[in-house]
Image (cartoon, rainbow, N blue to C red):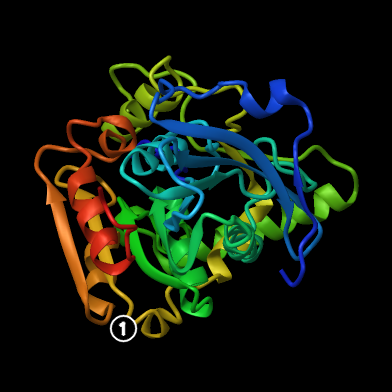
């Protein structure tokens, strides 16, 4: 059987904002800029001293005395804030939230070496540091901050929420458990012998790289497709490798030696610590990843809800506004995160 592409993918902090107006205001997203939202490029350091670059979105119409709930948005691994996470962040800002979409360490405009490393522990730290940063905004209601995770970024949103009591509610969109996939295969199809071989191959690659060999990369979306390509390959290509969703800073690759960290990381080992904070799962009816969300939903404590979007596949919920249930997401966050009085 043809092998599928592997994908998905402060303590007092030193907070900085770009001094270059062009850098701060330049619009380089794959989605149109909203006229009802202000955008600012910002940066901050995580606990490891890695500089994280983010986009801050705020409702354009606001008073100095207004206090708004905040939402941190996580991006799929290998993707960047100019893609789906930024689209969600801006869309929620249109609905009255202050939002932050960021590039994880080793990806996009954020710092960290080696590049394209997938480090679950660091990603969780990035999220908590993003919460640290958004809390410094004078317009934020510090008692009402939530998180929204997309695709392979969603498990790390759960991990962060389990250990960060400042996060009051979570929305998960087409969750993709990359740790489970790397350990068990897609649809749990991998045998123990396959896993053992991959672990040996991974260690061998680490040893080769220690001896200055070139790094081996795992490509998260194919560069081209054909009639023989799988439907998953075609779907990922159709978003990430076409004008619909491609962005020059999206690596869509991780180092193959990241597999050890991905396999050993358990993003849901502290799932019970999320409860009783509310969870909203959103999945596409035709998403190849839907079983990840369904399984976590069963294990999660109350209150929780699962919304299935008819006919939607995995990447449909990245950018198709007519399918993404923004009304439902807004209602969920408004219920659990206090909103400022409306005129």
The image shows residue 236, relative to residue 271, as above or below, that is above
Is 258 situated above or below 234?
below
**Residue located 54% across and 65% down the image:** 263
Outermost residue toward the right in this view: 211
Foreground residue among 101 and 295? 101
Look at 49% across and 40% down and name the residue there.
Answer: 57
Please give left or right for residue 230 compared with residue 269 in the image: left
Rendering coords of residue 127 (x, y %): 57, 60
- For the residue pair 25 and 44, the one nearer the viewer reads as 25
Would you say residue 153 is visible in this rendering? yes
Residue drawn at (64%, 58%) of the image: 133
Quadrant in which residue 59 is drawn: top left
Determine whether the residue tagged by mark 1 lies in a helix, strand or loop: loop
Query: Based on the displayed image, in which of its 4 quarters is residue 207 positioned?
Result: bottom right
255 to the left or right of 2: right
Residue labelled with disc 1: 276
Q: In the figure, 14 relative to 236: above or below?
A: below
Look at the image and tell me whether residue 106 can be seen.
Answer: no
Q: Position of residue 143 (x, y in %)?
A: 45, 72
């Amino acid at each position: 059987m043809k092998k599928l592409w592997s994908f998905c993918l402060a303590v007092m902090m030193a907070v900085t904002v770009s001094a270059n107006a062009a850098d701060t205001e330049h619009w380089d997203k794959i989605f149109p800029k909203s006229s009802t939202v202000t955008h600012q490029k910002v940066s901050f350091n995580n606990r490891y001293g890695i500089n994280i670059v983010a986009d801050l979105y705020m409702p354009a119409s606001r008073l100095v005395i207004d206090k708004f709930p905040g939402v941190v948005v996580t991006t799929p691994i290998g993707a960047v804030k100019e893609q789906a996470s930024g689209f969600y962040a801006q869309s929620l800002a249109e609905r009255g939230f202050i939002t932050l979409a960021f590039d994880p360490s080793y990806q996009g405009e954020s710092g960290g070496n080696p590049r394209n490393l997938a480090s679950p522990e660091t990603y969780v730290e990035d999220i908590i540091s993003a919460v640290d940063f958004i809390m410094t905004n004078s317009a934020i209601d510090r008692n009402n901050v939530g998180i929204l995770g997309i695709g392979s970024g969603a498990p790390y949103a759960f991990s962060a929420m389990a250990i960060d009591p400042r996060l009051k509610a979570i929305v998960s969109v087409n969750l993709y458990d990359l740790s489970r996939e790397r350990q068990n295969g897609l649809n749990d199809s991998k045998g123990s012998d396959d896993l053992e071989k991959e672990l040996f191959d991974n260690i061998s690659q680490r040893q080769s790289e220690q001896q200055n060999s070139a790094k081996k990369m795992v490509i998260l979306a194919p560069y081209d497709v054909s009639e023989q390509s799988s439907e998953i390959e075609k779907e990922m290509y159709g978003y990430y490798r076409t004008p619909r969703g491609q962005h020059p800073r999206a690596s869509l690759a991780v180092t193959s030696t990241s597999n050890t960290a991905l396999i050993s990381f358990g993003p849901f080992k502290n799932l019970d610590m999320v409860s009783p904070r509310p969870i909203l799962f959103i999945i596409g009816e035709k998403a190849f990843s839907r079983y990840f969300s369904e399984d976590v939903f069963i294990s999660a404590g109350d209150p929780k809800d699962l919304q299935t979007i008819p006919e939607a596949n995995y990447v449909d919920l990245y950018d198709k506004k007519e399918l993404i249930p923004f009304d439902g997401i807004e209602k969920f966050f408004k219920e659990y995160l206090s909103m400022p009085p409306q005129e």
